Image: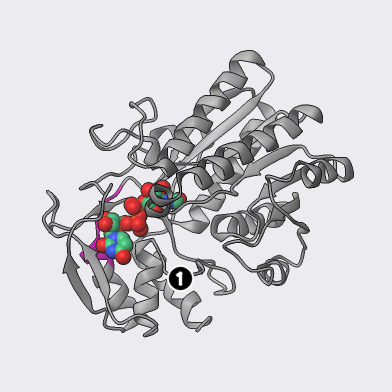
Amino acid sequence: MKNILVTGATGFIGSHTSVELLENGYNVIGIDNLYNSDKDVLSSIEYITGKSVKFYEGDILDYSILKKIFLENNIDCVIHFAAFKAVGESVEKPLDYYYNNVSGTLNILNCMREFNCKKFIYSSSATVYDKDNPIPYLEHYKKSATSPYGYTKVMVEQILSDIYVSDKDFSCVMLRYFNPIGAHKSGLIGENPKGVPNNLMPYICDVAISKREFLNVFGNDYNTVDGTGVRDYVHVVDIARGHLEAMKYVLISKGNIGINLGTGKGTSVLELVECFERVSGKKINIRICGRRDGDIDEFYADTTKAREILGWESRFDIEDMCLDSWNYIKAHI
Ligand code: WQD
């Protein structure tokens, strides 16, 4: 049985990936500082899979706990989710973002080197693509960023590329998620950020359960189908499946590759709201307001590389994503 270290194991994508790994016969060792998640996610994972995560509460910035994990477990591969991910917050607190997202990753990579672990899956993001690229985005397109959050992803991708140049035995896949939403069909795990949601779907869910009065639609004057922002929303369980396939790939190969995880389809804010209203039966009140700094009109993925290299493609559509999000959030009111 292979032992997989999952950082950010109780987070939105980390928890869904842990379920996928356990259900496919891998041992999961998890670390999380519970900054943006709750420990009760572990019991939900155990209920869903009948297996448990070997969990360490701690911070990736604490080398001693990373060393303890590697001393106590023979780690075959690391899947690294733990990071701050709010674009707007990163503009206000750049030092926190560079310290946590870049130095935290360096801590993990240094510990992997100390224990000769050379298999790494990195939680990257479509935000690494330069906003002037044509769409759909292809993996070789120009990278840049419009926020410190985005630059932490660009910087870590560069670090991983340089490590591979120095050590051809290092094997890494950088998974560039587009917009993960949805929840496990059990309704036991899903997206439940602490504080005011930065992202669209958790905010829609808050309005649906009357936790918030209306959704601010950040601009309706974009050059898109209805003037609102268009994104490639992808089901979190599809994202989790993508990590499983990427991990199988790095365990048997060497190299350093970036791969998009998206559906290849764009959906506007208003289209997502309409779909959510249809599947939930809930009215989502909206207020059109100004554009949000850093936002762009439209982007979505070219998914050829994921299909050809990982044999992965998304299975769930926007209705599934809305229904599963609604199913989760109404069970957690
Ligand atoms: C989606 C659309 C907004 C909130 C970012 C990161 C990406 C990933 C996902 C971490 C946009 C509009 C949003 C709201 C709105 N992060 N919107 N009202 O900005 O595409 O991507 O989050 O993994 O790396 O770049 O996602 O959900 O914030 O916004 O109108 O209250 O919804 O303008 O068009 P985004 P988002």
Q: What element carries label 1?
A: helix
Q: Which of 263 and 189 is in front in this view?
A: 189
Using residue 297 as the reference point, say whether residue 250 is left or right of it: right
Could you tell me if residue 307 is visible in this image? no
The residue pinned by badge 1 equals 324
Tell me if residue 63 comes above or below residue 201 in the rendering.
above
The residue at 17%/65% (across/down) is 289
Q: How far across and down, in percent of the image, does residue 6 sit?
A: 68, 49
Residue 67 colored in magenta in the image: no
Magenta highlight range: 265-272
Q: Label 1: few (<14), some or many (≥20) within 10 Å?
A: many
Q: Which of 49 and 77 is in front in this view?
A: 77
Q: Quadrant of residue 233?
A: bottom left
Residue type of the residue flagged with mark 1: Asp
Using residue 109 as the reference point, say whether residue 321 is left or right of it: left
Mark 1 C-beta closer than 8 Å to ligand 1: no
Q: How far across and down, in percent of the image, does residue 129 sit?
A: 35, 34
Could you tell me if residue 149 is visible in this image? yes
Q: How far across and down, in percent of the image, does residue 29 sit?
A: 76, 51
Q: Quadrant of residue 261?
A: top left
User: Where does the N terminus fall, quadrant-wise?
Assistant: top right
Q: Nearer the viewer, residue 11 or 83?
A: 83
